[in-house]
Amino acid sequence: MNEHSKVLKQYFGYDTFREGQEELVESILSGQDTFGIMPTGAGKSICFQVPALILKGITLVVSPLISLMKDQVEGLNQAGVHAAYLNSSLTAGQYQKALGYAKEGRYKIIYVAPERLVTEHFLDFALQADISMLVVDEAHCVSQWGQDFRPSYLKIVEFIQKLPVRPIISAFTATATKEVRDDIIDILLLQNPKVVTTGFDRPNLYFAVQAPKDKYASMKNFLELHAGQSGIVYCLTRKYVEEVYEKLMKDGFSVTKYHAGLSDGERKKNQEDFIYSRSEIMVATNAFGMGIDKSDVRFVVHYNMPKNMESYYQEAGRAGRDGEAAECVLLYAGQDVVTNQFFIENNNENQELDETSRRMVAERDRERLRKMTFYCFTNECLRDYTLRYFGEYGSNYCGNCCNCLTQFESTDVTEIARGIVGCVESSRQRFGTNVIIDTVHGANTAKIRNYRMDGNPHYGELAKVPVFRLRQVMNHLQLYGYLNVTSDEYAIVKLTEKSVPVLKGEEQIVMKLAKEQEHPAKIKGGRDEKAKRGRKEAAAGFSKEEFSEREERLFGRLRALRTEIAREENVPPYIVFSDKTLVHMCIIKPKTKEAMLTVSGVGEFKYEKYGERFLGCVREEEI
């Protein structure tokens, strides 16, 4: 067994690396700059933590959020690794003490906030320290074209240039388009980096989009079907968080909340209530979740549509980190688009950019919002749509999303498409989507009369076609490039090269339409037998879906023991052992130390801390 495999087993309890991990570890250990693009839950931290324990000196991990640092340092200390974090959550005394310990060489891994890097006290330490590697976690934050640009990340390059010896630089992110990846490499000045992309697919996640008339009633129905499970409900604004939280409290759900308007103390308490499983459901804005490695989140519901695919996939990806089946449901409403547009036009987060750059960022954000909106309307495979967005191409059928599990029929919409494209042409490409749809449908509104669109040759031409169908066809034409929409705030519909064959009647337009599209189903559990089979076949690792009654009972006892230990040590239950580790224990039913060490997630350090107690639990159940 090579050294990095020994470290993986000794400290983290795993016998083998997951896809891409060993390649990244070996690249770092060879001294090469390294860039890993791996989906949420794929095990990015292992890729830099394992080499950090082998490299001679200290590894610095630049991380954007306090919660992310705290969670990872807690997990490392539980595994027997000396680690610390340096950020604004520490008092001046605590910071100086931690820095003192760092100078003494007590820590192999130190997490640091980017704005701390170039401060006098930290530089005083760093210039004297033996820094083997600098890790840039959440590396998309360095790119102004990324979905979460943070100007403080630009200090990383300034810091590296001040060091007497350049360390190995490694960077990791979960969601980045090719453009953002190239930007990260350029900004961080990575030298001939080894770039590993493991693929963005998370086969164990079921994806669904719904547009219910009553969002709350549909969500409540979904939550009732998932009673006793841990999940996150994301909302666009604080107001939505408060409203949904109050309703769920009133309806008797085990729920807490998180948004920037709460005090630091309340946010901390609520976050811990969720992580420690004292509250089953977290209702939150997107301020919650980055770096929260809670492995047993069984569902993520988006009460509102996020602003881009990067945010959606990162947030949805917080479900099913243990590899077990989980569900990701997005509840769409037209108002979500309006709210996101308002956020884009009133973005105050990039004040450090010049006016030209700010306009370019806003234009990119509007384009991202359009792609996110198309996700909500497409009748194609949702997984395939997402993977294509990130530059991967699949079969357009995953068998584990609401579209793949819905009965569709191919429908010829050529005449409708010709009427819409003709209206855009005859109005000289001056109007937005709503005006075009209202015109071809023959709406008698003040706006249509003021624009004199009631005199357009296509006015009322499609009066017999329902508005929802016109909107579906309009979205299809935009999605597949027959029409384009400008990226400015007015969003004007324009013709493209592909418009010409449609206008001339030379191209047939066929869409997949659900047979009951007029009446979208309420959110159910998302789990008919076909879906269950698809998820089970796709989910990695072990599953408790086919547990016997006896194994189910043992699983309950092991979870109770884990909760007891977590309370004793004041750590989240998943820091002790993940659900996946407990499931594996139930399958193996270890009776000895040797057998327990074969369980995935049980390393030597954790065995010494907890092994005998869990062995005792297994033995008692077997009696």
Image (cartoon, rainbow, N blue to C red):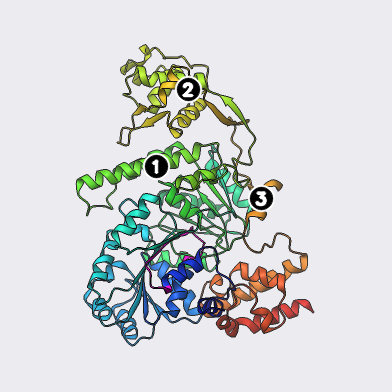
**Label 1 – label 2 distance at C-alpha:** 23 Å
How many discs mark residues in the rendered view?
A: 3
- Frontmost residue, 225 versus 209: 209
Q: Give coordinates of residue 320: x percent, y percent.
A: 57, 59
616 w.r.t. 515: above or below? below
* Highlighted range, magenta: 29-44
Residue at which label 2 appears: 417
SS for callout 3: helix
Q: Give coordinates of residue 443: x percent, y percent.
A: 43, 18
Q: Amino acid at mark 1?
A: Leu
- Frontmost residue, 1 versus 209: 1
Residue at which label 1 appears: 369
Instruction: Give the mark nearest the N terminus, 1 or 2.
Output: 1
**Quarter of the figure that contains the C terminus:** bottom right
Residue at which label 3 appears: 534
Q: Looking at the rendering, which quadrant does residue 195 occupy?
A: bottom left
Name the residue rendered at 24%, 71% in the picture. Answer: 118
**Label 3 – label 2 distance at C-alpha:** 35 Å
